[in-house]
Image: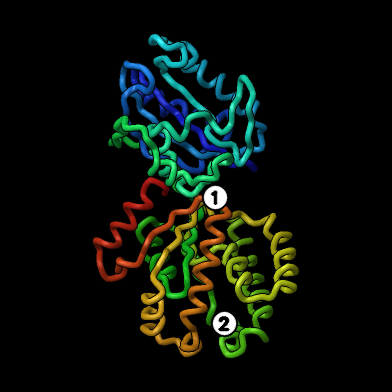
Amino acid sequence: MNTIYLSIGSNLKNRFAFLKKSINLIEKKISKIYLISKIYESDSWGYKSNKYLNLCVCIKSKLEPRKILKAINLIEKSLGGNERNYKGNDQYGDRTIDIDILFYGNKIINERSLKIPHPKIEKRRFVLKPLNDIAPNFKHPITKTKVFNLLNNCSDNLPVIYYKKKIFKEKFKFIAIEGNIGSGKTSLSNMLSKEINYKKLLEDFYNNKYLKKFYKNKSKYALDLELSFSKQRFKIFNKINLNYYQENFISDYSIYKSLIFSRINLDSKKLKSFELDFEKKNLSIIKPDLIIYLDQKIENLIMNIKKRNRDFEKSISKEYLYSIKKSYQNFLDNNSDINIIKIDNSELDFVNNKDDFKKILDTIYPYI
């Protein structure tokens, strides 16, 4: 499956209605929409006319780029979007609907009728602002610059204002919380499960017979630990495969946790064998629609670990927590196709402070 980002805009007639119609047609003709940004309003770009409403979406499809473009052209035509009311410069014109392919994975195409990545992305704040909502860490295939850096460095001064109306979508069916040891994954999973009425899946680490042994002798028991956790996780997530369309799930871990921890706990020979086995099993597993990553200061992690007072965790060192943090960061940086929201949890106490929990809800609300 290819991860594709589209930009959608309208500045004629009932702009909001045309955005909604285009969303429905994209899901019918091309793909389910996995992520949808907020809507933003801005002046027309490159010419003077009516204000535009713009948003971005993420879709996943096996269709090759030209077939995606053909389907987009048919959607635009059905909504009157191909009939431009040009304003001076023949590059620009008013549109009931305008849909552009921004990125198609990491593909680079430079043809007369199709250019990917879309030209001038880095110069258009009205594109970057909504794109940053859903893909802040995606790297431009040519410049290798993340979207949020493109937005921060954009020289376009055209105001892009949040538009209060929202286009609601079905909630993600499977959400996973990830983060370092002591970052609050289980607490947040419990709280969100109640708030959004999702069935919770909590990792049963207490009954793993290798965990306590691992903290006493990491080199001896690392492989046994990772294999046992991996087996347990695949067993649980296979159950999600069976019930994915009947229930919504939230878990305090993802299947990727096995990769993230194995890369710091195993030597290169054992890791290679582990990863090969993981990839074979991973093909049949339904992945999380969304991962919420809790970033936390090492000092706070140490404090949280001490508070919960588990005997087997007393030997956990700052160095080990740093290595876990680095492994998570490498994973986040190299998997921009996964829908990930990173939340800095360092100054928040969402368990005891309702306002802090609300801040987290407000952060993830556009995506669930």
Q: CA distance from mark 2 to mark 1?
A: 34 Å
Residue 31 placement, left or right of 322: right
Identify the mark nearer the N-term, 2 or 1. Answer: 2
Above or below residue 195? Residue 35 is above
* Quadrant of res 130: top left
Q: Which mark is residue 112?
A: none
Q: Position of residue 253 (x, y in %)?
A: 52, 66
Residue 55 appearing in the image: yes
For the point 65% across and 84% down, which residue is it? Answer: 219
Q: Is residue 134 above or below residue 235?
A: above
Q: Residue at x 44, y 54 (%)?
A: 341
Task: From the viewer's side, name the closer residue of 332 and 99.
Answer: 332
Is 261 above or below relative to 67? below
Local SS, label 1: loop
> Looking at numbered disc 2 in the image, what kind of residue is underneath it?
Asn
| Quadrant in which the N terminus is drawn | top right
Query: For mark 1, does the 10 Å Cα neighbourhood hold few (<14), some (14 to 19), or many (20 or more) residues?
Result: some
How is the protein colored in the picture? rainbow
Residue highlighted by disc 1? 336
Where is residue 69? Give x, y as percent: 59, 25
- Mark 2 or 1: in front is 1
Residue 181, image x, y percentages: 47, 74
Residue marked by disc 2: 207
Query: For numbered disc 2, what is the local secondary structure?
Result: loop
